[in-house]
Image: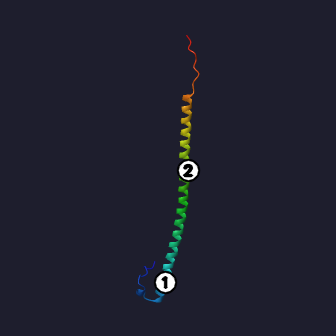
Amino acid sequence: MAPRPPRDPHKVGSFSELRSHYTQLYKELDECKQMKGITNEVLRTTAGQVRGAKSEAKKARGQVVALTKREHAKSKESLRRPTLRQPLQH
């Protein structure tokens, strides 16, 4: 790979060297844009998966709480109901 192009355009030796640096820089820019696009796509996919997992966890927590409340209500109800007592036999 060619050395990095100089920052100062006055340090470039010839116009052909300037063209080669220009071409090299545009190749690097295209590679960077491609990598940025790939990275953004991965982030979008990952963010979607995270959102889905969070919503599933939220639903699961709600169901656990609802089931617990129902069970609690059933247990209270069963304690409140009078049971039929067997008469004492002597």
Please give the name of the residue rendered at 52% of the width and 72% of the height, measured from the top-left corner.
Answer: 33
> Which amino acid type is shown beneath numbered disc 1?
Ser
Secondary structure at badge 1 equals helix
Q: Residue furthest bottom?
A: 14
Q: What residue is pinned by disc 2?
A: 56
**CA gap, disc 2 to disc 1?**
54 Å
| Amino acid on which the number 2 mark rests in the picture | Glu
Which numbered tag is attached to residue 50? none
Residue neighbourhood size for the residue with mark 2, other residues' Cα within 10 Å, grouped as few (<14), some (14–19), many (≥20): few
Q: Position of residue 10 (x, y in %)?
A: 41, 87
Please identify the quadrant where the C terminus is shown. Answer: top right
The residue shown at (43%, 85%) is 9
Q: Are marks 2 and 1 in contact (CB under 8 Å)?
A: no
Observer-nearest of 9 and 3: 9
Q: Residue at x 54, y 62 (%)?
A: 44
Residue at image coords 51%, 77%: 27
Of marks 2 and 1, the one in the foreground: 2
The label on residue 20 is: 1
Identify the secondary structure beneath mark 2. Answer: helix
